[in-house]
Amino acid sequence: MAVTPNPRSTEPLWSVGGVTAAVTALLGVVTAFGLPLTEAQQAAVLGLAAVVAPLIVALVGRARVYAPATVERLIRDTAPGPDR
């Protein structure tokens, strides 16, 4: 599978992490201000968000961040050489 870096991508984990944190905070505020859930239900929903959010960040981040070895291989494979 060929992976092409996106030159306009800047700090994908920071933006995804910020969005995830905002969603988690919003969920906490909504439950605190009127969503009719018991304390156990609130804890379960927030616990689920705390587990799922890092997984989403990892998946999105992995799709946008490249290991040094991958970058070297992409540069080597796409650089014009004497035989190209």
Image (tube, grey):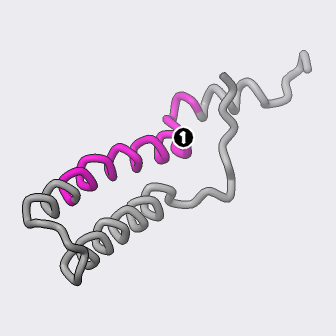
Give residue 30's quadrant in the image.
Answer: bottom left
Q: Nearer the viewer, residue 52 or 2?
A: 52
Left or right: 9 with respect to 29? right
Read off the residue under disc 1.
63
Q: Position of residue 14 (x, y in %)?
A: 43, 62
Residue at the top extreme of this rendering:
83
Quadrant of the image containing the N terminus = top right
Give residue 10's quadrant in the image.
Answer: bottom right
Q: Position of residue 16 (x, y in %)?
A: 45, 59
Q: Label the magenta part by its dominant secondary structure.
A: helix
Q: Nearer the viewer, residue 77 or 37?
A: 37
Residue in the picture at 66% in, 43% down: 5
Left or right: 9 with respect to 54? right
Residue in the picture at 67% in, 49% down: 6
Q: Position of residue 17 (x, y in %)?
A: 38, 61
Q: Which residues are magenta?
A: 46-70
Residue in the picture at 51% in, 35% down: 68
Examine the rendered structure and indicate whether residue 17 appears above or below residue 75: below
